[in-house]
Amino acid sequence: MEKSVKYDVVIVGAGPAGAFLGYSLACHGVKVLIIDRKIFPRYKPCGGGLTRRALSELPFDISQVVEDYTFTANMLFQNKLLFTRTFDQPIIGMVMRDRFDQFLVEKAVSKGVVFQDDTDFKSLSGNPGDLWVETSRGTVNARVIAGADGVNSQVAKALGLVIGTHVMAAIEGEVYFQDSDLIEKYKGAVHFDFGVISEGYGWVFPKKDHLSMGLVTLSGRLKNWRAGFESYLNLKQLNTYADIKPLKGHLVPFRSNKRNLFATPGGLIVGDASGFTDPLTGEGIFYALKGAHIASCVILDCLESGYDGMTEFSALIKKAFLGDLIRANRLSFLLYKFPRVSVSVLKAFGEVLCENQVEVIAGEQTYGELYNKVFNPLKVLSIMFKR
């Protein structure tokens, strides 16, 4: 990089939020640089489930990187089936994040974005409209900066944004088997297992030639996580000839604080950096993509009319996500804080909850509507006190 190079926007982080933000801006002729500290393509610990509402945010077909489409949802308690439901249309498209993220980066580059991997963000100086972004490969000039650099965003700190969130702790492994028939048994379906970890759940997502499996907990920490993962494999009777590569833990931000600000006149943050994740399912890619779309609209306006308007992004993203995620958090509290009670709730409302949850991840209704329809507090309390 040369110091004389000037970009309209520098984006730090090339995950779904950063890559899609770059694509969206470049489609309008904006000169964009995306940097990422990793060498692409890179493995990313993630279930890799793209819900129908996430897929609807993308203006292009991604079928070439989809490993499996799932039509059936299985809800279990300690591997005992509570209920199952099959739908006419796919619930989730399964991807591997290395291929999916690389695909999004290539889409951005095809529109004129400059991409630089193996590049660290170092510091930020200057004023809105005339920023200096120091990286491990040199310093570039930009009008706006966008941070898509994850839960511990360095761009947020450089902009002076103090982001308060809670975190889920997750462990995820790619599990391969010598017996290909075993993998085929899981194709087209997702498994959600309750009662296998405190304040959380386990999952099995089918991929082309293996299973992505994991555990997530709202407690924010995983004790003896490798042993816990092995126990989950044993419970699912998937431990025989299982080859796990790799097995990694990671943090997932959620419950973004109401008082958080996500932008200054100099720039904004999107994706995990902003802390918007579904606390019920752990889904973050939808919020990353939709947040990037909102961010692109704000940036485009500010490049034309001035940078003070950048701060409007905070109000817009809160309006889009915060109220609904508050309801989702109440649902997650009921399901995960009281696992035995949640089994009774799932047995009583499981079928209708599953149907309505699919409508949520399809973008056909909100968590607020689901909460009022299915989880009326009086109904839940009546079940709790019958125990």
Image (cartoon, helix red, strand yellow):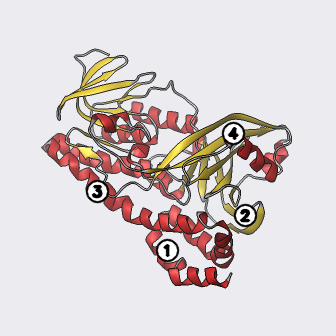
Which residue occupies the foreground of this view, 195 or 314?
195
SS class, disc 2: strand
Residue 91, by quadrant, is bottom right
332 is higher (above) or lower (below) than 134: below
The x and y percentages for residue 302 are 19, 44
Q: Which of the image's four quarters has the N terminus? A: top left
**Dot 4, how many residues are within 10 Å of its Cα: few (below 14), some (14-19), or many (20+)?**
many
SS class, disc 1: helix
Dot in front, 3 or 1: 1
Mark toward the start of the polypeptide (2 vs 3) = 2
Mark toward the start of the polypeptide (4 vs 1) = 4
Q: Which mark is residue 174?
A: 4
Which residue occupies the foreground of this view, 146 or 54?
146
Q: Which of the image's four quarters has the C terminus? A: bottom right
Mark toward the start of the polypeptide (4 vs 3) = 4
Cα separation between marks 4 and 3: 37 Å
- In the picture as drawn, the residue positioned furthest to the left comes out as 305
Mark toward the start of the polypeptide (2 vs 1) = 2
Which residue position holds label 3? 316
Mark toward the start of the polypeptide (2 vs 4) = 2
Cα separation between marks 4 and 1: 34 Å
**Dot 1, how many residues are within 10 Å of its Cα: few (below 14), some (14-19), or many (20+)?**
some
Q: Which mark is residue 371?
A: 1
Which residue position holds label 2? 76
The x and y percentages for residue 28 are 28, 40
Residue 256, by quadrant, is bottom left
| Amino acid at the residue labelled 3 | Leu
Is label 4 in contact with label 3 (beta carbons under 8 Å)? no
The x and y percentages for residue 199 are 61, 58
195 is higher (above) or lower (below) than 303: below
Residue occupying the point 35% across, 42% down: 24
| Amino acid at the residue labelled 4 | Glu
